[in-house]
């Protein structure tokens, strides 16, 4: 390595420089640093931490359903075959509170047996003081409404089934 006066510097100076750069990479948790001069290229790679694991999706819980020990549902599902559910499921796109009607004194948007078209408002989910209208993605007859008015719902929780 040379200095500004084109004098060769001892290797110890270069090693000290590299150690100083390595310390900078370590202290600042950098992935990589590259220094290039006319005489030398120095690349120092820091310890790469694996990317953080994505957060697990919340497990949908039926509003008002009793909480059971984890082994109980597994035992029940093993005892009886899974029911085949026909139709399309409308799920909650956000966490919040389910409301079946626009206000307490108004009738519900839909009832079991009603016919809906894709795009029709089927409920409201209140989240962070905002009332979010939930539109049906499907056309058909409302076969079942899973959520209860005024009950909390989770992201991805089944709200209703449309056949």
Image (tube, helix red, strand yellow):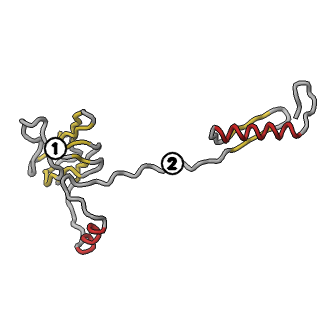
Is disc 1 surrounded by few (<14), some (14 to 19) or many (20+) residues within 10 Å? some
Is residue 53 positioned above or below 18 on the image? Answer: below
Nearest the viewer among 135 and 93 is: 93
Is residue 69 positioned above or below 126 on the image? Answer: below
Residue 137 is tagged as none
Is residue 23 positioned above or below 80 on the image? Answer: above
Q: Earlier in the sequence, mark 1 or mark 2?
A: 2
Quick check: 37 left or right of 92?
right
Quadrant housing residue 7? top right
Question: Please, which residue is most extreme toward the right here?
Answer: 7
Whether tag 1 and tag 2 are in contact, CB under 8 A, the answer is no
Image coordinates for residue 87, horizontal then vertical, percent: 20, 56
The residue sitting at 24% across, 72% down in the picture is 81
Q: Quadrant of the N terminus?
A: top right
* Element class at badge 1: loop
Question: Please, which residue is most extreme toward the bottom here?
Answer: 79
Image coordinates for residue 23, horizontal then vertical, percent: 71, 40
The residue sitting at 28% across, 53% down in the picture is 60
Quick check: 70 left or right of 114?
right
Image coordinates for residue 76, horizontal then vertical, percent: 24, 70
Q: How far apart are the two marked residues, 1 and 2, measured between alpha carbons?
A: 36 Å
Residue 52 is tagged as 2
Quadrant housing residue 133? top left
Nearest the viewer among 134 and 1 is: 1
Is disc 2 surrounded by few (<14), some (14 to 19) or many (20+) residues within 10 Å? few
Quick check: 106 left or right of 22?
left
The residue sitting at 64% across, 40% down in the picture is 30
Residue 150 is tagged as 1
């Amino acid at each position: 390595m040379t200095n500004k006066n084109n004098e060769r510097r001892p290797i110890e100076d270069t090693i000290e420089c590299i150690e100083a750069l390595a310390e900078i990479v370590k202290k600042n948790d950098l992935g990589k640093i590259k220094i290039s001069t006319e005489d030398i290229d120095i690349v120092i790679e820091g310890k790469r931490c694996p990317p953080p694991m994505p957060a697990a999706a919340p497990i949908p819980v039926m509003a008002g359903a009793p909480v059971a020990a984890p082994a109980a549902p597994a035992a029940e599902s093993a005892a009886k075959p899974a029911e085949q559910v026909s139709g399309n499921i409308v799920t909650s796109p956000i966490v919040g509170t389910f409301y079946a009607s626009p206000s307490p004194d108004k009738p519900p948007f839909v009832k079991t047996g009603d016919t809906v078209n894709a795009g029709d408002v089927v409920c409201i989910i209140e989240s962070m003081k905002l009332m979010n209208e939930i539109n049906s993605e499907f056309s058909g007859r409302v076969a079942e409404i899973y959520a209860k008015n005024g009950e909390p719902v989770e992201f991805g929780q089944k709200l209703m089934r449309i056949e």
